[in-house]
């Protein structure tokens, strides 16, 4: 459907917890976005799939502590492919407030911690996509 | 033979239906009470309360069972003390599995430890033991749980986070450095049947190395198909039937060779936390346990030989009385299943022994110190429910794994209940409460109804394979999310009584540095120094055993002894069994 925001969701690395990302997948879809969920993946694969699918947003989920290591690698891979201007990057999971700030510093456009509501996530993603690319869903 | 086609519920109804009951209450007095009750309702109870006599607590992971405003003897008119409760340590064990409960044996204070490399976790284990912890509980990092070596590309950036990295028997040795394996009880949180076969083999190889007879080892493993196939997100899975086979191989081997070890801890906790009610949590664990006992009987074993050491793992959550009642309910239900469905002879086989962990999803990020109170109430409910062993979550776990200070506070939560409240001096203190007994009865019925559903789908393994369980859970947690967002489920500081001022951030745990490099170096050294011919022989023998239906643990043990890494063993499982793709519902 033309104009739909397309989102790629993935579990970062070997993190076993997928209740959050499955919930978000459903919520984004219910909000009219096109969602692709690829389960557990590493940064290179996520970027490759994102390019293949031509997504607007890459969203990763990490509750296992690897948000800075693998999250950082994701942004690096994105920069190699020069995607950081055209795609939005968001991350959800369990990390400290200071780590959330670090994630923003290294290039994530949005961070979501436990307690983030459906409304927050959906509207944040819409806003981020609009701010970055001028597109509305 | 017709028995085999009957569900557990049908069998119990047939066998228990005709039992003679001796109601405690005098019917004539009850009748008088009923009149007085109606009078009271008419005169002292507000119209509004009469209209809304039942209220339903809305809590995270709750079962939404309606509660009466006041419970009286009229709530269970045919209450029969000996039939429904019995004394403690007596059939049907509603009041506890031992006559003296905590007077005889305190609940084990078994706090989880696990982060960084084996050296770091060794320190934290010693810290907890030095402060009065009575059991060890080791949690592994994600690569170890998912069975990838620390130097596998999939493990990059995740080694030693949220758990301890273990690649081989050498790491197992370091985790337990200076810890006498024959003097303490050790829970290894080997969630899956597959990683249980691998990691517990390393533990056994370690015991041998230290000259400790396996007879003297006490502790437990999880070894649960639910964790490997239902509540896990991972890159690779083996098929449910093969996973269940390994679960039973583990049980068989451990039961034969390590007599004091608990070889399975039916879940329980992780399933519920993933997103389901306290009722479904117990129904799934019971259905799993039933399938497991059936399989062990099919393998020719005696029911008591297996059942004496079965154990369960629950998640005490927020609805206080539901948590107390359901522990009592499942204890009575398990007794009935073992005695009447499986005809166990030993009393021990009928005991629902359990470890519990307070609910993780109930911990909020806002005002994290509130979580201390939440976990304390949950721990209290668990003690009222008569559990054998406890882990209390720490207040900072919506941020990271606990700091030392937070972990200590969790231990103190248990110790204060045990040493300061006087609760443990009396067995089953809430027994006889009109409310608690009515709720216990209601919950027992609901658990059995859900077990019946699972059996009608074709049994637990089929229910997994078909995605029946996955779907049920996905629906539950999506609905719960909306209940929270609409404010039906109230969470203090989050959607109710929100603080207008920002509170100071808490000190959050920082992972130690350099763990991944250290583990990789260790692995490289191991691969160089071990006898690689023996390694290859052992791995080949394991693959053969997998394919030929032999008990795999004999072979994983040999692999562990000669220095195979976990990843190497998992590769064999994948090769022998092939991969399975679980359903994802969203």
Image (cartoon, rainbow, N blue to C red):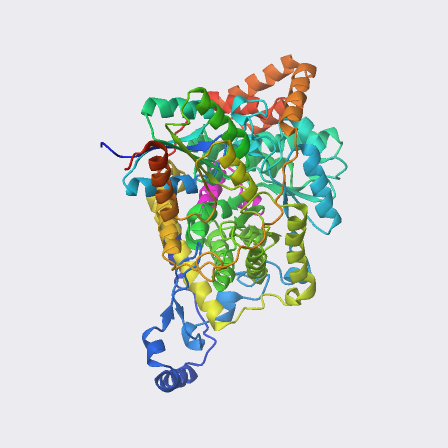
Quarter of the image that includes the N terminus of chain B? top left
Q: Position of residue B122 (x, y in %)?
A: 71, 37
- What type of secondary structure mainly makes up the magenta span? helix
The residue positioned 68% from the left and 18% from the top of the image is: B525
Q: Is residue B576 visible?
A: no
Q: Is residue B292 magenta?
A: yes
Q: How many marks?
A: 0
Q: Position of residue A117 (x, y in %)?
A: 40, 49
Image: B385 above or below B112: below
Q: Is residue B151 magenta?
A: no
In-image side of B513 versus B272 (left or right) = right
- Judge by depth and name the residue closer to the eye, B480 or A106: A106
In-image side of B167 versus B179 (left or right) = left
Image: B27 above or below B332: below
Q: Position of residue B206 (x, y in %)?
A: 70, 30
Q: Which residues are magenta?
A: B287-308
- Judge by depth and name the residue closer to the eye, B299 or B465: B465
Could you say which quadrant of the image residue B168 lies in? Answer: top right
Q: Is residue B17 visible?
A: yes
């Amino acid at each position: 459907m033309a104009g739909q925001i397309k989102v790629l969701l993935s579990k970062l690395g070997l993190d076993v917890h997928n209740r959050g990302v499955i919930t978000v997948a459903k919520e984004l879809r219910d909000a009219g976005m096109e969602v692709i969920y690829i389960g557990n993946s590493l940064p290179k694969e996520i970027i490759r799939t994102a390019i293949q699918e031509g997504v607007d947003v890459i969203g990763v989920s990490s509750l296992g502590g690897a948000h800075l290591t693998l999250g950082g690698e994701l942004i690096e891979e994105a920069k190699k492919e020069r995607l950081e201007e055209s795609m939005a990057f968001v991350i959800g999971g369990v990390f400290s407030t200071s780590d959330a700030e670090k994630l923003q510093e290294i290039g994530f456009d949005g961070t979501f911690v436990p307690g983030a509501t459906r409304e927050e996530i959906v509207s944040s993603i819409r806003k981020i996509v609009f701010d970055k690319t001028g597109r509305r869903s | 033979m017709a028995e085999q086609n009957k569900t557990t519920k049908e069998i119990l109804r047939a066998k228990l239906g005709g039992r003679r009951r001796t109601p405690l209450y005098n019917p004539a007095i009850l009748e008088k009470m009923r009149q007085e009750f109606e009078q009271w309702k008419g005169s002292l109870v507000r119209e509004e309360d009469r209209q809304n006599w039942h209220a339903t607590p809305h809590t995270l992971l709750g079962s939404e069972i309606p509660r009466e405003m006041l419970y009286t003897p009229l709530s269970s008119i045919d209450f029969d003390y000996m039939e429904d409760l019995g004394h403690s340590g007596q059939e049907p064990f509603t009041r506890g599995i031992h006559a003296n409960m905590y007077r005889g044996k305190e609940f084990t204070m078994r706090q989880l430890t696990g982060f960084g490399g084996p050296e770091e976790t060794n320190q934290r284990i010693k810290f907890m033991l030095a402060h009065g912890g009575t059991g060890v509980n080791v949690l592994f990092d994600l690569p170890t749980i998912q069975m990838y070596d620390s130097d596998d590309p999939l493990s990059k950036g995740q080694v030693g986070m949220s758990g301890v990295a273990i690649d081989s028997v050498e790491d197992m040795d370091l985790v337990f450095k200076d810890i006498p394996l024959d003097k303490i009880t050790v829970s290894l949180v080997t969630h899956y049947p597959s990683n249980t076969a691998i990691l517990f083999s390393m533990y056994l190889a370690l015991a041998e190395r230290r000259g400790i007879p396996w007879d003297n080892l006490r502790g437990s493993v999880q070894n649960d198909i639910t964790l490997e196939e239902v509540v896990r997100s991972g890159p690779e899975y083996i098929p449910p039937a093969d996973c269940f086979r390994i679960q039973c191989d583990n049980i068989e081997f451990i039961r034969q060779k390590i007599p004091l070890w608990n070889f399975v801890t039916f879940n329980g906790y992780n399933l519920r936390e993933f997103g389901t009610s306290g009722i479904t949590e117990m129904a799934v664990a019971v259905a799993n346990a039933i399938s497991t006992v059936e399989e062990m009987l099919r393998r020719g074993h005696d029911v008591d030989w297996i059942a004496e050491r079965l154990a369960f793992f629950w998640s005490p959550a927020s609805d206080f009385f539901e948590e107390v009642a359901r522990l009592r309910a499942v204890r009575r239900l398990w007794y009935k299943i073992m005695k009447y469905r499986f005809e166990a002879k030993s009393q021990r086989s009928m005991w629902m022994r359990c470890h519990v962990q307070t609910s993780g999803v109930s911990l909020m990020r806002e005002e994290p110190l509130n979580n201390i109170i939440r976990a304390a109430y949950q721990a209290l409910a668990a003690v009222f429910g008569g559990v054998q062993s406890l882990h209390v979550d720490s207040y900072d776990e919506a941020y990271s794994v606990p700091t030392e200070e937070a972990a200590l506070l969790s231990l103190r939560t248990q110790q204060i209940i045990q040493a300061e409240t006087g609760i443990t001096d009396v067995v089953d203190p809430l027994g006889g409460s009109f409310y608690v007994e009515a709720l216990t009865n209601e919950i027992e019925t609901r658990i059995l109804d859900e077990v019946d559903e699972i059996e009608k789908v074709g049994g637990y393994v089929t229910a997994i394979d078909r995605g029946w369980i996955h779907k049920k859970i996905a629906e539950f947690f999506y609905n719960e999310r909306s209940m929270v967002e609409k404010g039906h489920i109230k969470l203090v500081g989050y959607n109710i009584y929100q603080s207008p001022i920002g509170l100071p951030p808490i000190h959050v745990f920082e992972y130690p540095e350099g763990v991944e490099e250290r583990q990789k170096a260790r692995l490289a050294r191991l691969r160089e120094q071990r006898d690689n011919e023996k390694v290859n022989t052992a791995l080949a023998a394991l693959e053969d055993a997998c394919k030929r239906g032999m008990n795999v643990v004999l072979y994983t043990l040999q692999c562990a002894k000669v220095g195979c890494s976990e990843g190497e063993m998992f590769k064999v499982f994948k090769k022998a069994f092939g991969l399975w793709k679980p359903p994802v519902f969203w």
